[in-house]
Image (cartoon, grey):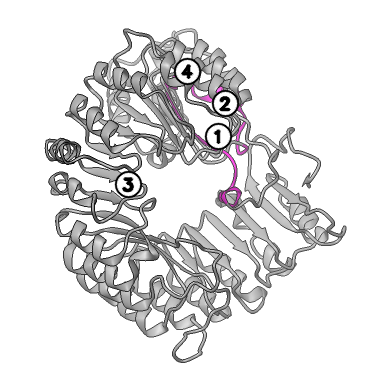
Amino acid sequence: MDPDPKKSKFLPSNLLNSNGSSHPQSLFPDEVLEKVLSLIDSHKDRNSVSLVCKDWYNAERWTRSNLFIGNCYSVSPEIVARRFPKIKSVRLKGKPRFSDFDMLPRDWGANVHSWLVMFAKAYPFLEELRLKRMTVSDQSMELLAKSFPHFRALSLSSCDGFTDDGLKAITTHCGNLTELDIRDSVTVDVGGGWLSCFPEDFSSLEILNFSSLNSEVSFEALEKLVSRCRSLRVLKVNESITLDQLQRLLVHAPLLTELGTGSFLQELTPRQYEDIESAFGNSKNLQVLSGLWDATSFYLPVLYGACSGLTFLNLSDAVLQSGELAKLLAHCPNLRRLWVIDTVEDKGLEAVGSSCPLLEELRVFPVDPYDLDHRHGVSEMGFLAVSRGCRKLRYVLYFCRRMTNAAVVTIVQNCPDFTHFRLCIMNPRQPDYLTNETMDEAFGAVAKTCTKLRRLSVSGLLTDTTFEYIGKYAKNLETLSVAFAGSSDRGMQCVLEGCPKLRKLEIRDCPFGNAALLSGLKKYEMMRSLWMSSCNLTMKGCRLLAREMPRLNVEVIKDKGSDEIQADKVYVYRSVAGPRQDAPPVVLTL
């Protein structure tokens, strides 16, 4: 390495004198290139910059401070540390998405500890760490808390492995902490003692989210913490916090822009009702509201005073009926994002269409996805109502039990700018319930009409025709999720041949076999990952893929009691680090 890298690292060799100093006539001095690169935030754009030439590669590596790694096994900590010497912020993802559905063994991997050991050596100035679907032990938390004196932000999304002791290490030792965000994490053994470990003079917190933790916390400690942190912008508490306690917190946090409430299951006196209503009315900066466990029509009016500025309303924990939702939405004219449970039914979605003209994202979750006898919920009628009133819709996740081709065709005609279209018909291989035909034309219309489409989830009774449409028209598609669909290998082949920007392909319970798998030999190195489970793959086909593409990691997860021929679950991803060394016995790396 150059003993004085700042001196010459940005200049082409023909602009350097024999002693390494820059040429006086240089048209592109290092200060200019450094300034330009400092304005580029997108990791995709920075990756492109690094490919221009060797000099730009060096310039980019020396100026990068933020790092995103979409798969913790795609590269090793040692390679990262060698390439990027000045990283201050890391975003790291671990397990594939199907771990959310218990389709991976508990000891599958994605342990963050080896990364933290290297970060402690290479990046003692690390300030931010954001992890998703990683295993984070108490030992790792303690190492993190004691190795980075300037550490400011920790985000744990869908992570597991830590207990109360791990969080205590963070709150005790990270004196400059501005963000502690724990969301959707599997933390059975976390108590509430960690909240009392913040130092008495600690006051820097701006973001606190512990909504996914199930244990009770010390409200006295929470109230003292909130009252000291005058710059608190985001506060999301768990279900143990009552309405009365929430009112006291709101008084101490007038600058909140995001609030996750606790439980609404509390008997309030008239005076308490007035106080909580007044507290919400004074929260003029609120833009995001979530939580609302056990909310009922009696207590929802206390929110109305804070609703006019809301842009995101997350009701995925609130089992509301259509009338309750309609009354609430009447006070939310500026909503851009809305998450609800299907108990609102089609009539509730009609209220969405009439009250939310600026809506860009809608997610409708099932109250119970495993209740096959559930006859209520939402249908094509609610979706149509939303599409008529919300013409700016870009993102939809819609769980339902019935749908028609004609409805989907109309929906995408009303909202042609979808970038994310995730339609989940919960009954596998469900046809158009009116015509009994396949749902091919529905998703064909999505692929044809929505030219900006980047993510697509398909469901219902589908043949290879759907995948022919996708391969022919979905040229910007990056992520495709498929379940219980297709007729033959041809379906998967059409997608791999026709979608030039495809990065993630997730398939389960489909008839695709070895021929389909091997048709992507030229494609997989340009993708982040491929997941296939309960398909017609064999160990022989997976071994052939591994032999033909040595830069891919091909992992087969064997189910208990499965034979030696079948490949039950297959996870394929590109890696510059080679096969991982921490795979459990049930994971075979080919």
- Say whether residue 521 is visible: no
Q: Which mark is residue 187?
A: 1
In this view, 533 is above or below 515: above
Question: Of marks 4 and 3, which one's residue comes earlier in the chain?
Answer: 4
- Drawn side of residue 462 relative to residue 556, left or right: left
Position above or below: 196 against 480: above
Q: Amino acid at mark 1?
A: Thr
Q: Point out which mark residue 163 bears.
A: 2
Name the residue beneath numbered marker 3: 292
Q: Are marks 1 and 2 in contact (CB under 8 Å)?
A: yes
Q: CA distance from mark 1 to mark 3?
A: 21 Å
Amino acid type of the residue tagged 2 in the rendering = Thr
**Rendered image: mark on residue 170:** 4
Q: Position of residue 56 (x, y in %)?
A: 41, 30
The secondary element bearing badge 1 is classed as loop
Dot 4 lies on which element? helix
In front: label 1 or label 4: 1
**Is the Cβ of the residue at disc 1 closer than 8 Å to that at disc 4?**
no
Mark 3 or mark 1, which is nearer the start of the sequence?
1
- Along the polypeptide, which appears first: circle 1 or circle 4? 4
Q: Which residues are magenta?
A: 73-100
Can you give x and y, in whole percent of width and height, for residue 202 in the image? Answer: 33, 11
